[in-house]
Amino acid sequence: MAEVLNLECSECGDRLPAEPWIGLCPDCQRPLLARYDLTPLSQLSAKSFAGRLRSLWRYHEVLPLHEGDEPLSLGEGWTPLLSLPTLGRELGLSHLYGKNEGANPTGSFKDRGMAVALHQVRAHGISQVSLPSAGNAAGSASAYARRGNLTLRLAMPDTTPLANRFECDYFGFDTELVPGSLREAGVWLKENLGAPWVDLSTMKEPYRLEGKKTMGYELYEQGCGQLPDVIVYPAGGGTGLIGMGKAFDELEEAGLIQQRPRMIAVQAEGCAPIVDAWETGKEQATGIEDPQTMAAGLRVPAPIGDRLMLRTIRESRGCAVSVSDASILEAAGHVARSEGLFVSPEAAATVAALPLLRERQDVSPDDKIVVFLTASGLKNVDDYRSQG
Ligand SMILES: [Zn+2]
């Protein structure tokens, strides 16, 4: 069991107590990072986790969990790391793997963040939370809010996939459909809901990141202590990318790893603020005016974690690339037919990026590469159908 020692501002480095609840650094309004005593972690190895709970809570040395508390869980995390031999052969990549996050309880990687964030909300005695979401996060938050007996208010763009809207209705929470993008949904909540509602927006509280970082711990454990050479990740809000970077920081600090994967962020051409910043050598992104892509999870025009994402990519010697909607659609069909995996458009974007990365020599034939298949395609049937 681990207690959060304090919360460190990712920008100014100030350290704040973890109690009472706090979302962002009060001085610079930037994300906060949970810090733990890493001594218990440093006494473990990749084999130490064997036989533990089959959920992300198996990494309890580095998660916020008080002694004796039951974690809020629907069995999230501990997803399969699958080899992708057919795709690998076609692309000339001998060690290509997919982390199948569609195996999570509500079908996406969002469950990791929601389980840990809502666990912490409940542990702080808070019962009302709000969230703007482009789709999968809303469905996930709804499930975990019900599981934890919490009240949730949602705002979503009116273009959100039908299945996501339906599942939120089914869980029985009030949802506002707002014209525009995720940005407008966030503005709606800000203008219409204040205290005591706690804002669960991406990177506006410290704990969704803690859940997402377990993807990094799983790669460490599933690789028997060896991390892959390259991680290819679809970056909307970027919590997963930043979270895995944090996991590798912790593993390194605990003396368990020496080498870290290169982190490659994939965005859609119609909404690529991180790629734009990366290509022009900037440390922070400029917001996109009219974000356009069929991948709802990549329609994030102004991510608040931009500086952290760019830092994670830079420090890992990675890069950022964008792909077209046409190539995302083609990749989704191809992954289904070649590997038997029906994945979301965001997940397909990582596969769509591989030929480009190969051509630019950002990846080599012998690299061990893990693409993050962040969600199942089952909630995107309407999107795929309408795109032909
Ligand atoms: Zn600060």
Image: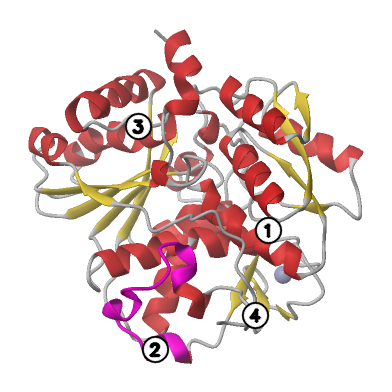
Q: Residue at x 55, y 82 (%)?
A: 1
Left of 113 or right of it: where is 31? right
Give the Cα distance between marks 4 and 2. 20 Å
Give the Cα distance between marks 1 and 2. 27 Å
Q: Give the answer, above or below, for where 374 lies relative to 95.
A: above
Secondary structure state at the residue bearing disc 3: helix
For marks 1 and 2 on the same chain, the one whose residue lies earlier in the sequence: 2
Secondary structure state at the residue bearing disc 1: helix
Q: Nearer the viewer, mark 4 or mark 2?
A: 4
Per the image, the residue denoted by label 3 is 348
Left of 135 or right of it: where is 333? left
Identify the magenta region: 40-58
Name the one closer to the observer, 26 or 205. 205
Q: Ligand 1: which quarter?
A: bottom right
Give the Cα distance between marks 3 and 1. 29 Å
Q: Please provide percent x and percent y for residue 32.
A: 66, 67
Per the image, the residue denoted by label 1 is 118
Classed neighbour count for the residue bearing mark 4: other residues with Cα under 10 Å, few (<14), some (14–19), many (≥20): some
Q: Residue at x 61, y 75 (%)?
A: 65
Per the image, the residue denoted by label 2 is 42
| Residue 254 lies in the magenta stretch | no
